[in-house]
């Protein structure tokens, strides 16, 4: 939403996404979204207009995984600001599907980012703002803002499993550093090739064993991330849609929270 003085709303227009730095490879659903985000949020980054996981197509003149990740990194370095909607689903331990829809705004250079939660329903209209070394968690029902250290996994108010950290990072080379990366497929899109990359975790004890990412070569941004606990057991599938870049977002818009909210300092 372009108005910096917005009021949280389930039907509010989308926020812009941001890119943050990942401290360690993702090991659980919390580090997806990120992934998501950007990836994750990554990321997240960002983190998906098309959802194709096809291990086929010719690669004769296509880039290898290292080159694709290099193009993605170079694109993100040029990025001034970004907005998108992160949507998809997570599976909890009981196999129940949890819908996710989060509007994201981000200015990577500051860094600053905001996440407006539309789904899950239980967290609707809550907001999370990342600025400098703080995370500000706004709870709509109580009209309170809890301020946490940026590395505190408690900062996300139940959005992710306890003990999991959140990372919004769209630089997949950073998010999946230390993983084995390969090109799983290349497909002709309307405006250029679309690459499907496969990331295989070299740690057999990790919660995430395989991640599949789709990247559009027309703008070198990730469009979709699918995470697997094993080769055939996926537990998260998220997409970046309604992506807009370099629209002139400012810090006041991205970090806005209601002025009348009570502030609770939870920093350690």
Image (cartoon, grey):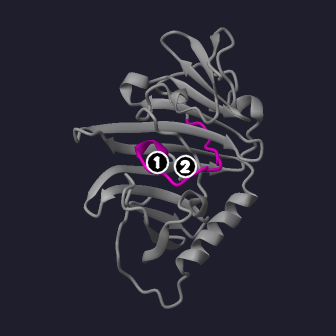
Residue 164 drawn in magenta:
no
In the displayed structure, would residue 205 be above or below residue 186?
Answer: above
Q: Which residue is mark 2?
A: 42
Per the model, the C-alpha gap separating discs 1 and 2 is 6 Å
Q: Secondary structure at mark 2?
A: loop
For residue 54, side relative to residue 108 (left or right): left
Q: Earlier in the sequence, mark 1 or mark 2?
A: 1
Where the N terminus falls, by quadrant? top right
Asked whether the residues under the numbered discs 1 and 2 touch, taking CB atoms below 8 Å apart as contact, a structural biologist would say yes
Count neighbours of disc 2 (C-alpha within 10 A) and say few if under 14, some if 14 to 19, many if 20 or more: many
In this view of the protein, can residue 29 be seen by the observer?
A: yes
Q: Position of residue 129 (x, y in %)?
A: 63, 30
Return the x and y of residue 30 as percentages of the image width and height. 45, 41
Picture residue at 52% right of the left edge, 39% below the top: 165
Above or below: residue 163 compared with residue 215: above
Q: Give the x, y percent position of residue 159.
A: 44, 31
In-image side of 39 versus 184 (left or right): right
Could you tell me if residue 187 is visible in this image? Answer: no
Residue drawn at x 64%, y 70% is 71
Q: Which residues are magenta?
A: 14-32
Question: Is 223 placed above or below 10 here?
Answer: below
Q: Which residue is mark 1?
A: 32
| Nearest the eye: 113 or 93 | 93
Please tell me whether residue 32 is drawn above or below residue 228 in the rendered image: above
User: What quarter of the picture does the C terminus occupy?
Assistant: top right
The majority secondary structure of the magenta stretch comes to loop
Residue nearer the viewer, 250 or 108: 108
């Amino acid at each position: 939403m372009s108005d910096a003085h917005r009021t949280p709303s389930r039907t509010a227009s989308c926020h812009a996404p941001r890119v943050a730095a990942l401290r360690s490879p993702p090991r659980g659903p919390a580090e997806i979204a990120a992934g998501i985000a950007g990836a994750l949020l990554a990321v997240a980054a960002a983190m998906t207009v098309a959802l194709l996981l096809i291990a086929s197509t010719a690669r004769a003149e296509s880039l290898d995984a290292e080159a694709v990740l290099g193009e993605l990194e170079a694109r993100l370095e040029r990025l001034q600001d970004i907005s998108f909607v992160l949507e998809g689903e997570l599976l909890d331990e009981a196999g129940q599907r949890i819908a996710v829809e989060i509007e994201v705004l981000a200015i990577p250079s500051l860094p600053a980012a905001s996440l407006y939660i539309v789904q899950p329903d239980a967290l609707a209209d809550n907001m999370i703002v990342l600025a400098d070394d703080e995370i500000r968690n706004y709870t709509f029902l109580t009209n309170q803002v809890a301020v946490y250290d940026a590395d505190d996994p408690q900062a996300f108010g139940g959005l992710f499993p306890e003990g999991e950290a959140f990372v919004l990072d769209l630089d997949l080379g950073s998010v999946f550093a230390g993983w084995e990366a390969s090109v799983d497929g290349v497909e002709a899109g309307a405006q250029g090739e679309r690459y499907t990359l496969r990331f295989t975790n070299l740690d057999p004890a990790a919660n995430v064993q395989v991640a599949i990412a789709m990247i559009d070569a027309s703008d070198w941004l990730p469009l979709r991330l699918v995470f697997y606990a094993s080769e055939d057991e996926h537990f998260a599938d998220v997409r970046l849609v309604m992506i807009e870049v370099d629209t002139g977002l400012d810090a006041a818009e991205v970090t806005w929270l209601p002025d009348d909210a009570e502030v609770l300092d939870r920093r350690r």
